[in-house]
Structures are given as C-alpha cells and as structure tokens.
Image (cartoon, rainbow, N blue to C red):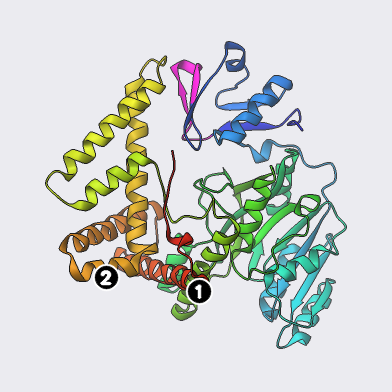
C-alpha cells in the first residue's frame, strides 16, 4: 500500500535540515537520513507533496520515522466518507443531549446505555435525536459498551465519542482526511476543556494540564514516543481495521491497549491537534483525584498485555549513568555527569561523520537527551515512585534535596510551558496532587497484580 498522489507531509518542527538539504536529522528515536540530489528536489520548502512513486516512498519513510506529519487540510477527502457515531453512556442524560446536539443530523448514531440507573432519561434523549438505542442489562464498562455499538456499524468508519465531550463541526471531517493514508487505522483530535463561566482552580489546572490533552503538535501515536497513547474520548477509526474492537476485560487503559495493538499490527494511529473535542473535566477535588488514581490503575493491566511497552521511564545506558551520578549528590557528581555527556557527544559526532558540523549537532542532541533524562528522573521521584521517595526523604538529606529540586524544577518548567491561567502556587499544589494520585493508582494496581512491571524503568540503546 502506498500513499496516493496529492498526499502532503511536512517536516516536524524538531527535524533539522542539515548541510543545505543533504540530510535530515530528527524523528524518534533521532536518526540521520541522507538525501540524494533527486530526493532533495522533491521538497517544496519543508513540505513534500506526493507526485509519483519516489515521493510516495520518501513521504512514507518520513512518516515511519516521525520526521514528518501529514498536512491535514491538504489531504484529499475519502471517497466514501460515511461514518457512524457510537456513544457509550451510563446515565448523564444532560451530557448526552449536549453531545448529540453537537453531532447534528445526517449520520447514524448508536447510543449504548451501559445499564443506567435511570434508563428512561437516556432513552428519551436518544429518541429525541433519532439515535438508535442499545440497552445493556448489566454494566460492562466503556470498552464492552463500545464493542456492542461497533458490532452494529455498517459504514466504513466509526466515531467513538464519550457522552461528556462536545464535537466541533470540522473535527470528524478533518480526521477522516488522514485515512487517505491506507495504513492509518485511527485518528484522534486534541481533547481540550469545555469552557466554564466560573472555572475552579482545579478546572484551570486541568485546562492547562489535562491527562487527555496530548499537546499542540501533530504526532504519530506509538509506544515509547512523546505521544505514546491516545484517548478514546473521541476517536475516528476504520471499521475493518478494528477487528473485535476494545479489550472488554479492561475498564481503564482500554484505549491505550487498542492503540498499541493497532501499531503492533503494522497500522498507524495519528494525533491531529488542528481539530478539537471539548471535554467536561472533573472539577471537584475529590472526583478529580479519584479519576487520576483510576488512570494510574491501568498501568498493571497494560504491563500484563504489553510488557515490552510499559515503563515509567526509558533511559539510554548513558542516561542511567548520568542520572545516577547526579542523584548521588557528591562533590564529584557534576564533573562525572559532565564527563558522561562529553563521551556521548563524541560518540554521536562520530556517527554524524560526513556532515559539516558533527560536533555542533551532537552537542545539541546530547543536551536534549540530558534534559529528557532529568525530566524522567524527576517524574520517577515525584510521580511513579513517590512512596519510595517519601521513605527515602525520612532518612536521607540527599534524597530530600534531590526531591525538592526535582519538584520545584518540574513546576517551573511545566508552568511556563503550559501557560496556565492559574498562579504558580496553586498550579504547583495541583501538579503535586496530580502526581500523588496517579502514582497511588499505579502502586495499587501493581500490588494487586503482585508485579513490579509497571514500576520498573527500561534501559534501552
């Protein structure tokens, strides 16, 4: 299967054009892709339109490596754009009515009532919008409810939409354009917060730092990459690629599992932040903390199904040595860490031999790797391993210092990046509560499963 003529990709903002176009440096993991003179002429600026077999091959290669992404607005619409919307719901008639109004008419809608306490209210809303109602006698969870709707879909595409979101008019049509790539099995929009007249401080934090919001940059959804999963709150999928659908045995993490199974089968999942779906975030502190903890409990079931993908952090061997040197907190720690970075820079520069400025490029890559290592180490201390960190702080001044530095640096860096409409103090409190709740969920699931797989970092070259 090849990309069709008219398909357009654009280089990722982190992909560097090296030596006047002789090579590209980027992707995940980072690599150097040397270009022939003919390949260089295929580009129009940072865009590559597919015109023939050669440009289709190169565009496909750039998509595989994460060096480039499809330009959604430039892609052709599918020849058969018919889709069915499947909505799993349990109670929430008000939210369901709001979602169905945002969907509008013209497309089949299947509402799967997952054993509501007041089914008549849900049925009335579905009937009012002309939606087909499937009423389940026993509560089975969102994964099984979506599957019940999926079995009734007769259109080429299905849209899974949770009842607590609102769809923009151009969200689904734009996501459908990604299926011009025959390997794409699913595409997801950016999940943003539903506007509120008087948002609480938790709502303001969630609007800036929601677990469902995967950022403002397009990306492939692949395990071990910056966008390693996608939420099923809103997803457009090719029906014939889904098989039986979600894992009905999972009540949380089923969306992550589906993404990873699709990728393992050789399909692509695209994250497209150019379009959005607004989500009604939990804004009561207790509900919010409970939801964060529930997200954490998905770690162990995922570790059982995908042991090669689940890890709270992924380090290169040199990153492990670099982090360990700094965590020791001795006088020699900083010089030792600098020496590790120096050796890594030289090794990377040798791999970039043939470029004009190998050491300059290598230094930049090493610096980025060091920052990523520090960020992951900070997350281990304050999020995934916080129970161990708390014990360590009770007995060690070095652990207390390392934890304090990690917590403050994390808040400072993330607050600036998130551009939160919340003061730094309350943002910092929410950030730490977020980490504590999620980490508690991870530990709860790990202890319940009698396995440390979801807590063990992975070291890989």
- Residue nearest the viewer, comparing 245 with 226: 245
Q: Position of residue 259 (x, y in %)?
A: 64, 53
Q: Position of residue 81 (x, y in %)?
A: 82, 48
Which quadrant of the figure contains the N terminus? Answer: top right
Q: Where is residue 82 in the image (x, y as percent from the top left)?
A: 84, 52
Q: Is mark 1 on a helix, strand or loop?
A: helix
Whether residue 169 can be seen here: no
Whether residue 356 can be seen here: yes
- Magenta span includes 217: no
Q: Residue furthest right?
A: 154
- Magenta span includes 19: yes
Dot 2 corresponds to which residue?
391
User: Around disc 2, counting alpha carbons within 10 Å, would you say few (fewer than 14), some (14 to 19), or many (20 or more)?
Assistant: few
Q: Is mark 2 on a helix, strand or loop?
A: helix
Q: Residue furthest left?
A: 331
Tell which circle, 1 or 2, labels the residue nearer the N-terminal end: 2
- Residue nearest the viewer, comparing 452 with 420: 452
Which residue is depicted at the point 70% across and 26% down? 56
Which quadrant of the figure contains the C terminus? Answer: top left
Q: Quadrant of residue 46?
A: top right
| In-image side of 48 versus 51 (left or right) | left
Q: Position of residue 106 (x, y in %)?
A: 84, 60
| In-image side of 26 versus 109 (left or right) | left
CA separation, marks 1 and 2? 21 Å
Q: Which residue lies furthest to the front in this view?
A: 450
Range shown magenta: 12-24
Which residue is depicted at the point 59% across and 68% down? 252
Dot 1 corresponds to which residue?
448
Which residue is depicted at the point 67% across and 67% down? 162
């Amino acid at each position: 299967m090849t990309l069709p003529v008219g398909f357009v990709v654009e280089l990722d903002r982190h992909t560097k054009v090296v030596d006047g176009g002789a090579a590209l440096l980027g992707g995940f993991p980072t690599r150097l892709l040397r270009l022939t003179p003919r390949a260089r002429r295929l580009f129009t600026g940072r865009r590559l339109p597919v015109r023939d077999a050669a440009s289709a091959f190169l565009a496909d290669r750039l998509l595989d490596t994460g060096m480039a992404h499809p330009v959604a607005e430039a892609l052709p619409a599918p020849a058969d754009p018919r889709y069915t919307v499947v909505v799993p719901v349990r109670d929430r008639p008000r939210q369901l009515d709001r979602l169905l109004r945002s969907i509008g008419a013209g497309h089949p809608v299947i509402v799967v009532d997952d054993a509501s306490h007041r089914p008549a209210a849900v049925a009335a809303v579905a009937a009012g919008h002309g939606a087909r109602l499937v009423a389940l006698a026993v509560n089975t969870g969102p994964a099984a409810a979506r599957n019940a709707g999926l079995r009734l879909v007769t259109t080429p595409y299905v849209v899974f939409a949770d009842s607590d979101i609102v769809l923009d008019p151009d969200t689904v049509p734009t996501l459908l354009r990604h299926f011009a790539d025959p390997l794409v099995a699913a595409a997801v929009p950016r999940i943003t917060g539903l506007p509120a007249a008087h948002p609480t401080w938790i709502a303001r934090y969630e609007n800036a730092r929601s677990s469902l919001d995967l950022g403002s940059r397009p990306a492939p959804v692949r395990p071990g990459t910056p966008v390693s999963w996608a939420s099923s709150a809103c997803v457009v999928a090719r029906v014939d690629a889904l098989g039986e659908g979600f894992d009905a045995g999972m009540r949380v993490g089923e969306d992550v599992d589906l993404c990873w199974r699709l990728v393992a089968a050789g399909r692509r999942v695209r994250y497209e932040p150019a379009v959005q779906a607004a989500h009604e975030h939990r804004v009561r502190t207790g509900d919010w903390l409970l939801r964060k903890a529930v997200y954490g409990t998905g770690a162990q079931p995922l570790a059982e199904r995908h042991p090669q993908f689940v890890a709270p952090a992924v380090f290169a061997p040199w990153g492990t040595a670099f982090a360990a040197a700094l965590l020791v907190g001795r006088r020699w720690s900083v010089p030792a860490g600098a020496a590790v970075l120096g050796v890594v820079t030289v090794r990377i520069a040798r791999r970039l031999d043939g470029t004009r400025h190998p050491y300059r490029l290598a230094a930049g890559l090493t610096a980025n790797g060091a920052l990523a290592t520090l960020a992951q180490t900070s997350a281990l201390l304050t999020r995934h391993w916080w129970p161990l960190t708390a014990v360590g702080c009770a007995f060690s001044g070095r652990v207390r210092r390392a934890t304090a530095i990690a917590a403050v640096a994390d808040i400072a860096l993330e607050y600036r990046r998130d551009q939160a409409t919340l003061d730094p103090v309350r943002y910092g409190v929410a950030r730490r509560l977020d980490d504590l709740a999620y980490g508690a969920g991870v530990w709860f699931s790990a202890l319940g499963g009698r396995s440390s797989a979801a807590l063990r970092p992975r070291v890989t070259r």
